Image (spheres, rainbow, N blue to C red):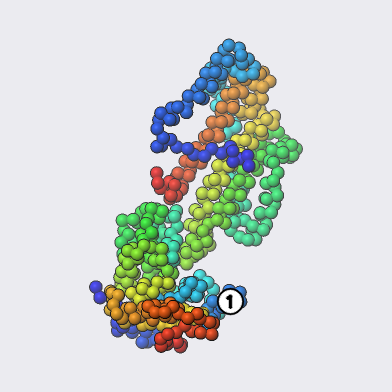
Amino acid sequence: MPRPSIRDPSLSAGARAGQAAVRVKNFTRRFGDNAVLDGLNLQIEQGEFVALLGRSGSGKTTLLRTLAGLDPAGDQDVSVPAARAVVFQEPRLLPWKRVWHNVALGLQGNDARRRAEAALAEVGLAHRSDVWPGTLSGGEAQRAALARALVREPRLLLLDEPFASLDALTRLRMHDLVLNLWGTHAPAVLIVTHDVDEAISLADRVLVLEGGRIAAEEHIDLRRPRDVGASFQSIRRRLLGHLGVEQGGAPPPPRTAQDSPLVTFPVREITP
Amino acid sequence: MTLVDTIRFPTTFTGVRWSRVGRRWISPLLLLALWEIGARTGVIPTRVLAAPSAVAATFWGMAASGELTTNLLVSGARVAAGLLIGVLVGSLLALTAGLSKVGEDAVDPPIQMLRTLPVLALSPLFIVWFGIDETPKVALIALAVTFPIYLNLFNGIRAVDPKLVEAARSFGLRGWSLIRQVILPGALPSFLLGLRFALAVAVLVLVVAEQINAQAGLGYLINNARDFMRTDIIVVCLVIYALLGLGADGLVRAIESRTLAWRPTFLKT
């Protein structure tokens, strides 16, 4: 099945018209004296699939939470679509509501159950619609969480390390599922992850968050499904370089604070 | 805490061999037999403790005459009224304190101070205030019930996983629907634990409250029996109190298995 990418003209029409799904300008977020995000600029086009990499504590989750509206943006310049939905690292299903009811949470109208069950069918969980979340496996629970996000027809889907706690095989299946759903519904997607391979196999564009801003970005022009080939490897090496992990050579020399940004390859700074 | 001791935790015999269960009945039955023999041979005089057979005969007699049912209903009505009021008041206070910081600051300090009072010590004051009718009895039970309900429900509301609340908020739940769909169901297990404590303490307070010049009820029966040294009637009433406690516990367990069907402990069975 052909999957749309940002290069697909039908989808990038919005992008060419300059209708970004997400636009963040010069965004700063402090916790005490510590600026986690510091003058960050970010733009995500309609229907674009973006992965956000970064070391732990780099502010990935803070950025996602800001876009989700879970953390206040204050009066700073953050524009996001009203229709957006989050899939968290943990499924966060209410254990006292049956699976379909969890998916239908907060939906208005008489057809909430029908819509919820349709979304569950899309993620392959139609047969588990009427059970308690406590009986679901980790992968099933995360698929239910995905259905709960999709049933809202989001224009922006935010995924916060959604597959981090799944086993490797389940994670691969989830990757296929997410790409399929993205192909069908075409929301803009921002996935926060610390898994470089995951980022490369899913996204149109991979961003590296470092020092409170986007320090590097890679466009992934490989056809999906993406096998680990030579170009995959070289992208991987570059991204790991951005993240401060050197591969297949002498261990990197100890860095000092003055060495920033951590760039070993031409990097485009995003300018608004 | 003494309340904890009076709570019976659920035990099931599933998976235990019946021979084992049978074996556990031997010593109680043996004690019962010794008691009977002791009473019949005069080792245990009737004014100290009536024989089990005499207790059983008295029980049937009282049950047949309707004396037992009438008084049991009177006592039951006192517990029910006290529980109803106590659970309502305790829940309202817990909701007020649990759902807002202002509410907590207003409600929690006085409750925490009052709950250190042994409720039974208030009975003289309650008699002065409410006389010797039903009111002081029901009021004592209601007051005693309020504290375990308040403490557990308040704690339960505050212990609801903030991640679930956050997720529900992100899916558009606000205000009352957030409380009804997320916070209250999340606090329900704690509330039911509080209800268990409440039922136990209600029966406990009932026993004492009924000694206040009662004209009917189990306490009245016991007081009368004491005056006539009828140990058989006293034992019958003690057994009824025990059955009340057992029944109350069964009630909460029934509520739990209905309302907490989603919990992993229930899912396994």
Q: For residue B55, what is the image quadrant?
A: top right
Does the rendering let one see residue A227? yes
Residue visible at 66% across and 33% down?
B208
Residue A130 placement (x, y as % from top left): 36, 54
Q: For the N terminus of chain B, which image quadrant?
A: top right
Residue B231 placement (x, y as % from top left): 62, 20
Amino acid at the residue labelled 1:
Asn
In this image, A154 relative to B174: left or right?
Answer: left
**Label 1 crowding class (10 Å Cα cut-off): few <14, some 14-19, many 20+?**
few
In this image, B132 relative to B261: left or right?
Answer: right
Residue B250 placement (x, y as % from top left): 50, 37
Residue visible at 54% across and 49% down?
B190
Which structural element holds mark 1?
strand
Residue highlighted by disc 1: A34
Residue B96 vs residue A208, the one in the foreground: A208
Residue visible at 53% across and 46% down?
B192
Count the labels in the image. Answer: 1
Q: Chain of mark 1?
A: A
Furthest residue toward top: B41
